[in-house]
Amino acid sequence: MIGTFRGRSAVALACRLLGIGPEHEVLVPSYNCGTELDAVQHSGAGIVGYRVSRRCEIDLADLIARRSGRTRAVYLIHYFGWEQPMEELRRWCDDQGLLLIEDCALALFSRGSSGLIGRTGDAVIFSLPKTLGFYHGGLLSLPQSRTIETPRLTPPGFPTLLMEIRHSALALTLRRLESFGLYGALLSARRHLPGNRRTPDADGAFPHMPADYYFNPEIDADRGLHPQAWAVAGSVSSAETVCRRRANYLRLAGALDGIRGVELLYQQLPEGVCPLSLPLLVSNRDACVEALMRRGIPALPWWAGFHQNGVDWSQFPEACWLKHNLLTLPVHQELDDRHSDYLAETAAQVFRSTGPDPKTPLLK
């Protein structure tokens, strides 16, 4: 396992170690954050999107049809901790002589049909901030059968450790603000800061993702994970984390069941899944996000921005639909029963009072 500064750093490093370069193309899922696409493009390779359904399921037939003579690898994302169908894709990649890059940034500690998710790819990416709340940290796993010289990465140094400490201190400060009833106002104000607003393109159909999502070689390339982050990550109980996240997920999902205009992205929580969050399909998504933020709930319009270089978004209406209608609510392991109850009660009130948008029907 190789520790990197960020998840995107691990993606770029994987491409370098696997020999992916300008003469190649990588098949990438149409529903994406965008930062992983930019990290792939840092290798010089082109990207070709493939279809993902409104249920975040990859379309294997569409993926296969988009292969060309330049295709070198397939990039796959396990969304929110749920496993994608891996066996058939792995067999096809092996038959075609293609590499498989497995993105588990949203699936740390999750299990699927064959055990822990992240044991199938030729390179596997993990992210520490998304599940553990760190300021920085990515992990790159390569199979033991692949002989690759250990890369030399720039040590992150004291400034990164200082930022990690500040990040932790901020979390404590926010908890204190919560006790005074100021947390919601702070979240709402933060969303309107210039650096956090999404800038629409010319026709407004595909708003830009945040500028800091793009790969910055000076910050992101060939940088390692701080040793203290290694130590803290190693002390985390995966079993307790999974158990608490699942309990918070089920409590919140149960409270929102049956509310008009709101639907769970996943109808079941399979055994072993460590949910990153509670993903919901909401017909009046942006209004609901604003209302929830005002009440101190960090609801996220998940991956609402669009990477602007290399993907023809008009080919992927399902992914665009998800970017306009998917909202996530927190199920973090540090949320206690009091927090979970407030989340459930407040979210139910907001969704009932805001109401569905009749112009945006949900899945049937």
Image: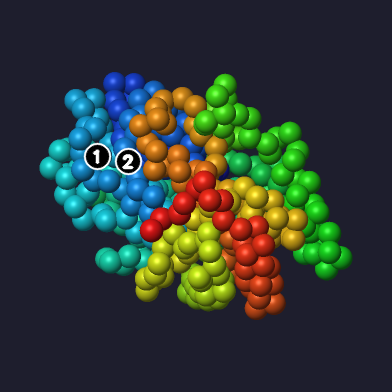
Q: Earlier in the sequence, mark 1 or mark 2?
A: 2
Mark 1 and mark 2 residues within 8 Å of each other at the beta carbon: yes
Which residue occupies 67% across, 44% down? 160
What is the quadrant of the C terminus in the image? bottom left
Which residue occupies 65% across, 57% down? 354
Residue 364: in sight, yes or no?
A: yes
Residue placed under numbered mark 2 in the picture:
51
- Seen in the image, is 312 located left or right of residue 331? left
Extreme-bottom residue of the structure: 337
Q: Secondary structure at mark 1?
A: helix
What type is the residue that disc 2 sits on? Arg
Q: Is residue 268 above or below residue 192?
A: below
Q: Position of residue 20 (x, y in %)?
A: 32, 30
Q: Position of residue 350 (x, y in %)?
A: 66, 62
Extreme-front residue of the structure: 358
Protein image colouring: rainbow
Residue placed under numbered mark 1 in the picture:
62
Res 44 → quadrant = top left
Which residue occupies 21% across, 55% down? 87
Q: Could you give the CA–CA distance between mark 1 and mark 2, rounded to whole angstroms?
A: 6 Å
Q: Nearer the viewer, residue 123 or 296?
A: 296
Extreme-right residue of the structure: 180
Q: Position of residue 320 (x, y in %)?
A: 45, 39
Res 116 → quadrant = bottom left
Within 10 Å of the Cα at label 1, are there few (<14), some (14-19), or many (20+) other Cα atoms?
few
Q: Nearer the viewer, residue 215 or 355?
A: 355
Within 10 Å of the Cα at label 2, are there few (<14), some (14-19), or many (20+) other Cα atoms?
many
